[in-house]
Amino acid sequence: MAATPSFSSSSSASSSLMSYLLGFSVFLTLFLSSLEKGFAVEENQLLHQHAHTVELNSLLPATSCSPSSSAKGHDNKEPTSSSTVLKVVHKHGPCSGIKKNKSKIPTHAQILNQDQARVDSIHSRVNTKKSPSAATVDKLRPSAETKIPAQSGSVVGSGNYIVSVGLGSPKKMLSLIFDTGSDLTWTQCRPCAKSCYKQKEPIFDPATSSSYVNISCSSATCSELVSGTGNTPGCSSSTCIYGIQYGDQSFSVGFFGKERLSLTPTDIFDGFLFGCGQNNQGLFGGAAGLLGLGRDKISIIEQSALKYNRFFSYCLPSKSSATGYLSFGKGGGSSGAVKFTPLSDVSQGGSFYGLDVVGISVGGKKLPISGTIFSSSGTIIDSGTVITRLPPTAYKALRDAFQQGMKSYPSAPALSILDTCYDFSNADTVTFPKISFEFGGRTTLELDPTGIFYAASADQVCLAFAANADDSDIGIFGNVQQKRVQVVYDVAGGKIGFAPAGCP
């Protein structure tokens, strides 16, 4: 009987222990749950920090023109006496003023195929030493008789965005594609000895200008066409003949001459070297010709060097319905937000502007890409290439990381060269990872949300990057990735700068 109380005491202790353990278990469960919730909140905050959430409409093409209120630069200052600003518009956008035949507007697949032709041409120019040829020149058969607003145009072998400049005395306003990958400035000219395509403005007639002068075949100036066009100049009745062909087989052939170029009423250049096209064919979309912004001595950058000191900048608008600008000279000002990276040398690509890419980040995480992948191929920035081209190794890393952040969205069919596409037709807003490029000099550029996708429609929105055929092919930083970024070219200073939100 004496053992009974002892048994009762032991039973009570056991019950108390069980109650304690049960209470601790509940506490531990609640504690771990709160930790998980905390981690989830923190993770969501991190995801939000490294992702964009935007209205779907902001990624899709618009149909009406919404120009910016002025031709101000990134720092919102009016142009000064040392700068010239031109308006930039998209060539096939609603702000271009070019009458459009819908049957002749290229499809998205055609645009991307033409873009690939341009890239192939650039790779050929950079990687292969070619003997200049007069084959294009032979197509001509002469007959017996500062800050500029910038707009975006459809892809052609020679560029996408157009500006308006004045040519001749009295001046005639012409819409020209501006292209950092080309050097020669040219326009179609009467009498069009062989062929001229339809353009927005009346075709320029040198016979009505008091300031037009032909360049002689025997002059040293004529021989400068070799480096500026890649073709040996021809000769017709002692007049120098130029010929230039682009990646999509578009071409212009005609007389090489001097003329008065008016960028603004006060910024005028007499004796400006340009091509007066007599045989012109291709996908120029109603533009009157091309404004060459390359680094060769016949480019507008070199011809205006005494005034602007080889300094220019531009901002490409987020949509073809908006306007950007092209600015010459430092007076238009690069703001303190501009971060510069040194211009890099591109082997045999003297006209191109080289960038030293050292890394890419997706969703705040740097991709595991060896630096030698970028350094061995090199990279250029090009206003005329639409889709950024990366070494295949780098593209695969970017694509795979981006896809990880897009698992909640249904995929869509590939669009030409674009293999990572999504169907956003059931979404009002879209959330996607941020993408940043790191350049030499510790310069980082976070792409604008509008610079990540190429949208054909709401149900086919694609990652706007593509792989080169080989890791050794030069990379190209295209114009989609440049949207809304103020890109500053200080050629004399040997550097290129970037600043966000430079235009609408």
Image: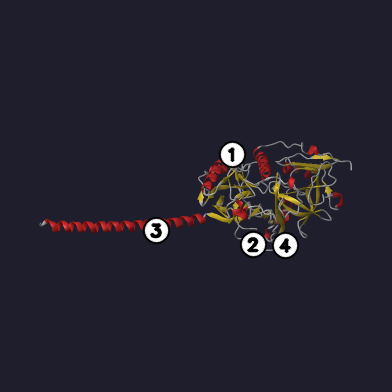
Inter-mark Cα distance, 2 to 3: 47 Å
Marks 1 and 3 close (CB-CB < 8 Å) = no
Q: Which residue is mark 3?
A: 34
Say which label, 4 or 2, has the lower sequence index.
Answer: 2
Q: Which residue is mark 2?
A: 75
Closer to the camera in the image, 183 or 171: 171
Residue 480 versus residue 117 in the image, above or below: below
Residue 485 versus residue 390 in the image, above or below: below
Q: Which residue is mark 4?
A: 81
Q: Is residue 116 visible?
A: yes
Q: Residues within 10 Å of mark 4 (few under 14, many from 20)?
A: few
Marks 2 and 1 close (CB-CB < 8 Å) = no
Q: Amino acid at mark 3?
A: Ser
Say which label, 2 or 1, has the lower sequence index.
Answer: 2
Which label is found at residue 459? none
Closer to the camera in the image, 140 or 92: 92
Which quadrant holds the C terminus?
bottom right
What residue occupies the far bottom of the structure in this picture?
Answer: 77
Inter-mark Cα distance, 1 to 4: 45 Å
Horizontal side, residue 45 vs residue 285: left or right:
left
Instruction: Residue 78: name its quadrant.
Output: bottom right
The residue under the point 82% across, 51% down is 202
Q: Amino acid at mark 4?
A: Ser
Image location (x, y in percent) of residue 493: 64, 53
The residue under the point 87% across, 52% down is 208
| SS at mark 3 in the image | helix
Instruction: Residue 169: name its quadrant.
Output: bottom right
Q: Which residue is mark 1?
A: 472
Closer to the camera in the image, 469 or 270: 469
